[in-house]
Image (cartoon, grey):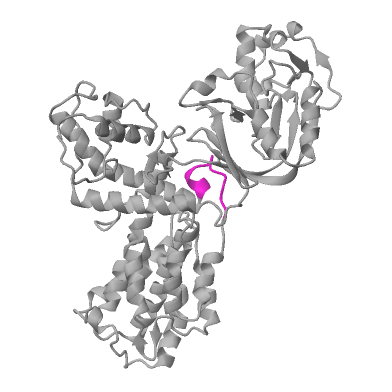
Amino acid sequence: MSVTGVKSIALFVVMMLLTACSNAPDRGAANFIVAPPSVDQIEESVTSQVALMVNAFAPVAGQALPNETIQEAYEYRNFKPIWIEDKKLNLSIYKLVDILEQASSHGLNPIHYHTQVIKEYLNLKSPSRQQLAELDVIATVALSSFAHDLSIGRYEPQLIDPNWQLDAPSNEWSELLFLESSVDMVNYLPSLAPRHPHYQVLQKWLVYYQDLASKEKDIVVDEGPTLSIGRQGERVAQLRARLVQLGDIRFSTRTVQEDKFDRKLKDALINFQRRHNLYPDGRAGAQTIERLNVPMSVRAKQIAYNLERWRWLPTQLEAERIWVDLTDYKVHTILNGKHTSMKIIIGDQDHKTPVFKGDMSYMVTNPTWRVPHRIAQETLLPILYERPNYLIEQGYKVLSNWTIGAKQLDPTKINWKAIEPEDLTYRFEQDPDENNALGQYKFMFPNKNEIYLHDTPNKRLFRKANRAFSSGCIRLEDAAGFAASLVAGTNKNKALQNAIKKTDTKVISLPKRLPVYLVYFTAQADVNGMPEFREDVYERDILMSEAMDYKASNNAPF
């Protein structure tokens, strides 16, 4: 029989046991004595039920399986029950249920943690030893699953998005199961959530949006002419009310004319536009109104996707790091007690920059650009079909192959139109000069994607708001400043200055290796603690939606 079949039968048996039971004591009877079965009998039943119940209630659909840890935890206790002490059901199991029922506050679905099943068991008037054993194991499975999901995420990142290659699994969550008592376990559980301030701020806004969406209808701003300072009417009143609802206008005791577009309304609208990746002109045109009218439930989902992304990151981020924020088109350098940032250009739709972590160990000044084979096939060859002299114009060399002793060829004597991309074997290199695609600097953190940070001679694209134009690598607005910050205050600074004055290529090792994170968030906390919603430039939220928006019951968060 398949694993699915075994799980289905086990679940069916459990539910049949539950539906046959009558009404039972409520929480006020939490200390009811479960006297009929002896302690030895319960322990014997726990031993026999662990394997069956763990398999029956384990996560499915590719989520990580904490089964072995649960087995080990019971073995560690010689299969003594975790939730029953001195023949009494410990009150901590009720606190566990409370926590699990609030899983949606972290963007997780309570249905995954068997809360209804546990409550049905708790309502049994005279539970048998088998039922007590089942309750004990199911509660432990729920505890373990939530601890895992809250700590490192419910889903395997690459099962959702193959372009997300940053996964930092940790087993620290499992230590909870080996604490002395269930009270200690339950009390420790909330601390497993990521402690990064951005996660904590987003989590609070998720609760706000969820609570508001459950109590109020979205205030909609009607379509119409652009609203700006001095305008008056019902649509202005709608705009004001919506900005109050979304938190951009705080409640005030000062009397205002609600249907008049005044300076304070303009300031609030500018704040809204900034945190929604819109041009902050303080005018409510069609695009701004469209963003204003996005339902709160949709924003709640978006926040939930990004909380899961935070759980995929390491529990502890390094104090000094390079943080490439793809959706914000910025790189942040946190080094020597300073935080600096600059604009970047990322991969376009056909060359999505992946999410991953590397370690930057050196930079190259006046680099030669050896065109990656993929880019030569996808980008360079199509240009040569139309402009055979392009290589000469841009200072490229053509070599016969990728070996060390490859011969240089005359590009004008090659019939480029006769070459299919899959048959391309030539190597292309661009010598250091003012037109070199890499500019004067290349910053290396070796990785399988052949992604690096580099300078660029083309600065005009940095004036664009959305900057997804590269072939995957990261272009820096101020590569010289970035290079200087990496060696500031060290003996490498003079070496950098000397190297950049010359035209030959020079490798400069960094004073220390620096972790480089390439990350992707479509919802993030801004400097004012407000939620910032960004363009989903690579449409990765769609993939998150397919995995996370499972709604199994009316109690599901989404």
In the image, taking residue 252 as reference, residue 4 lies left or right, namely: right
- Answer whether residue 161 is magenta in the image: yes
Q: Position of residue 13 (x, y in %)?
A: 33, 72
Q: Residue at x 54, y 75 (%)?
A: 72
Residue lying farthest left? 234
- Asked whether 277 or 556 is in front, the reply is 277
Question: Would residue 94 be found to the left or right of residue 370 on screen?
Answer: left
Whether residue 209 appears in this view of the structure is yes
Above-or-below relation of 275 to 407: below
Residue 287 counted in the magenta span: no
User: How many numbered discs?
Assistant: 0
Q: Look at the magenta stretch and give its main secondary structure.
A: loop
Indicate left or right for 41 with 231 as reference: right
Residue 409 in picture, x, y percent from top left: 80, 13
Q: In the depicted view, which residue is nearer to us: 106 or 428? A: 106
Percent from the top left, x then y, of residue 38? 38, 93
Quadrant that contains the N terminus: bottom left
Give the magenta-colored segment's residue range: 157-168
Quarter of the image holding residue 294? top left
Q: Is residue 202 above or below residue 484?
A: below
Identify whether 400 is placed above or below 1. above
Residue 531 position within the rendered picture, expressed as x and y whole percent measured from the top left = 37, 43
In the displayed structure, does residue 111 sit left or right of residue 467? left
Above or below, comparing residue 100 to residue 83 in the picture: above
Residue located farthest toward the front when viewing the structure as drawn: 254
Visible in this render: residue 446? no
Residue at 73% in and 22% down: 425
Residues 184 and 497: in front is: 497
